[in-house]
Image (cartoon, helix red, strand yellow):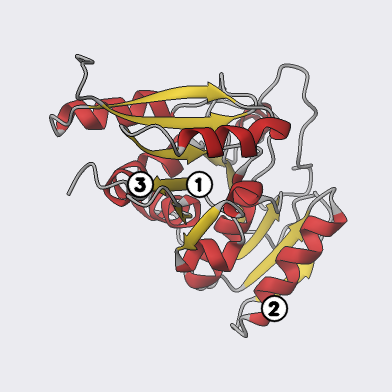
Amino acid sequence: MQIDGETKIVAILGDPIAQAKSPELFNALFERYTVNAVLIPLHVPPAKLGAVLDGLRGVANLVGVVVTVPHKIAAAAYAANLSAAARQTGGVNCLRLETDGMWSGAMFDGIGFVKGLDACGHVVRNRSVLLVGTGGAGAGVAHALVDAGAASLDLFDSSTESLRRLEAALRSRGDATLIRRSAPSAQATHDLIVNATPCGMRVGDPLPIDLTGANPDAVVTDLIMKPAQTRLLEDAQARGLTTHPGRHLLENSVETMASFLRLVP
């Protein structure tokens, strides 16, 4: 990769940011398409998000930003235009800088997650799902699971407000998927178990989900990219359960995000 005065810039904003896999995947994509662009990580604490987004609007060779933990919900408020999925979930994971200096936001977590499951042969339609974590990524995944025809969706979050917001949004859709509150514990009825919390990024984090009562045929998934093998996935593997790491979500959405940023066809 060669960076010069004509290189287009994409940034990924997060706190923490060391776990981000987007630079690796996006920059490989740019090389594959021979696009003169680069994605760089920016460590942005929540209190600085607004100032950073406002400042980046003045960078003429910046095409947009990727948004990761914990900014997905907050960043949506800075977008003048939102995609249907972003409006539905209330969060964004990508902001495109328009020629008028305004942000357009979109959410690709859900479609990337479901595409990743499908690519690995894991069926969503008519399945029962436990989803722990109802923030930006969790909300995106929840709506996509409903779109994909999940029979039921059991939700848990330590934030009652976040849980209430997603529960209300899902029920207002009027789909056939049964929406319920749950404990962060796998049941024998759950076919798919999803960790959409950041719990597992740091050494010493507790297990976000109790797998003691899990269905032996269940698929256990984690949205965390780094470490690739979280404590939850290690626990699932030790119990003989099928695991699905977080990289599949990003691998199945990076090209769509780059297209949204108008960097690839």
Q: Helix, strand, or loop for circle 1?
A: loop
Do the residues under discs 3 and 1 have CB atoms within 8 angstroms? yes
Three-letter code, disc 2: Arg
- Image point 59% across, 82% down: which residue? 175
As helix, strand or loop, the secondary structure at mark 3 comes to: helix
Q: Residue at x 60, y 83 (%)?
A: 176
Residue 58 screen position, x and y as percent: 43, 35
Towards the viewer: 43 or 51:
51
Type of the residue with mark 1: Asn
Residue 134 visible here: yes
Which quarter of the figure has residue 248? Answer: top left
Q: Residue at x 54, y 32 (%)?
A: 13
Task: State the mark number for residue 257.
Answer: 3
Labels 3 and 2: the sequence-earlier one:
2
> Dot 1: within a 10 Å radius of its alpha carbon, few (fewer than 14), some, or many (20 or more) residues?
many
- Viewer-side label of 3, 2: 3
| Crowding at mark 2 (Cα within 10 Å: few <14, some 14-19, many 20+) | some
Residue 242: give x, y in percent of width and height: 54, 42
| Place of residue 4 in the rendered image (x, y in percent of width and height, measured from the top left) | 21, 16
Across the whole image, how many numbered discs are drawn on residues? 3
What residue did someone put label 1 on?
A: 93
Residue 259 falls left or right of residue 71: left
Q: In this rendering, is residue 225 above or below 75?
A: above
Instruction: Please indicate whether residue 186 sits to the left or right of residue 9 in the image.
Output: right
Disc marking residue 38: none
* Residue 1, image x, y percentages: 21, 16
* Residue visible at 68% across and 35% down in the picture: 198
Distance between the Cα atoms at labels 3 and 2? 28 Å
Would residue 124 be visible to someone looking at this image? no
Element under label 2?
helix
Instruction: Determine which residue is flagged by label 2.
Output: 171
